[in-house]
Image (cartoon, rainbow, N blue to C red):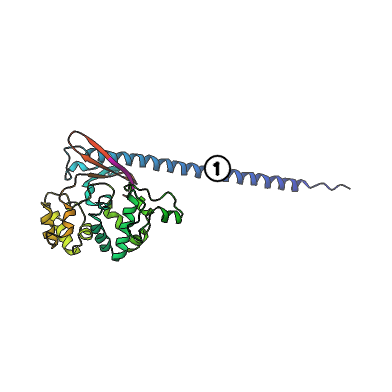
């Protein structure tokens, strides 16, 4: 005898199938809505970032104009509702030291002293300066036993090092043997150096920390110099600034003798203009920086970079 399923059982099975289909459809719809929402958000973020970059570029363009100065009110802009704007800052790249300019026999002792100010032991400082110089010179002779040349890098698994030329970026310095000692002793040391500029320090733009570490001056004296330079309001690039007029004046304010070795590293006005502009649109923000030689007839961009920035 053949036993047939009851009508109620068939209806129950159909209902389960229908419920399963409805569940799948609901899941598909929810997934589509979520994906669409994520896409819309990503598109909005991208649009906002593009508009923020456009605002940052606007600040760069204004600051690069030959008649604009570091105290010009045009360096800041914000829309009436605050939804977009930019803030540009003009300084010099000589507010940091060009490390390439220090990698020679004449300046090597000064760089060794700076590294000692970064809390490196004298021997380690001398070895690191030698390694940096061996990276940039053209020969294959080691300046010190604790330096590194082509054979040392090859044995360490880096057959194409050193590059035997000047550093083109601060990131390249991370490839130099022994740099990890400086990273451990003073992690923020890169903020004091650049691969652009004249190699001297602009005391009217450098931070108190940079001035103290480069000259070996007491940090309190370096801070006093900056306070005098920035005037009563303590804000740089305002009308009450009192710029340093000569390196000798800077040495006096730092409490250092005029014949101090650091005196040769100081200047009162750098020639490499650095412009940083922060642009924002809504919640999106981005920074753009350029280096240029500013003159009335022509602007040559030496370097351009973008950096992330929060509002």
Most extreme residue toward the top is: 297
Q: Position of residue 40 (x, y in %)?
A: 44, 41
Q: Is residue 18 visible?
A: yes
Nearer to the camera, 121 or 192: 121
Q: Position of residue 237 (x, y in %)?
A: 16, 49
Q: Position of residue 131 (x, y in %)?
A: 34, 56
**Quarter of the rendering containing residue 70:** top left
- Residue appearing at x 40%, y 50% in the figure: 161
Most extreme residue toward the bottom is: 121
Our reading of the magenta stretch's main secondary structure is: strand
Looking at the rendered structure, the number of numbered marks drawn on it comes to 1
Most extreme residue toward the right is: 1
Query: Considering only vertical position in the picture, is 278 above or below 157?
Result: above
- Residue appearing at x 20%, y 59% in the figure: 215
Residue at which label 1 appears: 29
Q: Position of residue 62 (x, y in %)?
A: 22, 38
Q: Is residue 91 left or right of residue 138?
A: left
**Quarter of the rendering containing residue 64:** top left
Query: Considering only vertical position in the picture, is 156 above or below 79?
Result: below
Query: Considering only vertical position in the picture, is 93 above or below 156?
Result: above
Nearer to the camera, 240 or 141: 141
* SS at badge 1: helix
Q: Which residues are magenta?
A: 302-309
Q: Is residue 241 left or right of residue 162?
A: left
Q: Is residue 268 left or right of residue 190?
A: left
Nearer to the camera, 119 or 230: 119
> Does residue 305 belong to the magenta stretch?
yes
> Does residue 218 belong to the magenta stretch?
no
- Residue appearing at x 17%, y 40% in the figure: 68
């Amino acid at each position: 005898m053949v036993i047939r399923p009851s009508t109620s059982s068939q209806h129950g099975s159909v209902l389960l199938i229908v419920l399963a289909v409805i569940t799948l459809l609901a899941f598909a719809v929810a997934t589509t809505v979520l994906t669409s929402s994520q896409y819309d958000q990503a598109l909005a973020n991208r649009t906002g970032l593009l508009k923020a970059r456009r605002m940052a570029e606007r600040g760069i363009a204004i600051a690069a104009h030959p008649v604009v100065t570091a105290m010009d009110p045009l360096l800041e802009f914000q829309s009436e509702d605050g939804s977009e704007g930019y803030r540009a800052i003009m300084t010099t790249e000589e507010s940091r030291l060009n490390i390439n300019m220090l990698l020679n026999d004449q300046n090597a002792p000064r760089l060794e002293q700076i590294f000692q100010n970064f809390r490196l032991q004298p021997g380690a400082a001398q070895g690191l300066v030698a390694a940096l110089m061996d990276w940039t010179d053209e020969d294959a002779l080691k300046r010190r036993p604790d330096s590194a040349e082509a054979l040392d890098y090859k044995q360490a698994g880096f057959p194409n090092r050193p590059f035997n030329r000047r550093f083109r970026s601060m990131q390249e310095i991370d490839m130099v043997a022994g740099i990890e000692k400086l990273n451990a002793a003073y992690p923020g040391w890169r903020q004091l150096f650049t691969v652009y500029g004249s190699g001297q320090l602009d005391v009217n733009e450098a931070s108190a920390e940079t001035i103290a570490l480069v000259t070996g001056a007491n940090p309190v004296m370096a801070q006093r110099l900056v306070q005098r330079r920035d005037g009563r309001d303590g804000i740089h690039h305002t009308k009450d600034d009192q710029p340093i007029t000569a390196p000798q004046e800077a040495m006096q304010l730092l409490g250092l003798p005029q014949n101090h070795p650091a005196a040769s590293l100081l200047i009162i006005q750098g020639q490499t203009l650095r412009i940083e502009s922060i642009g924002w649109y809504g919640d999106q923000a981005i920074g753009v920086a350029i280096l240029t030689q500013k003159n009335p007839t022509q602007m040559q961009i030496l370097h351009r970079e973008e950096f992330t920035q929060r509002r």
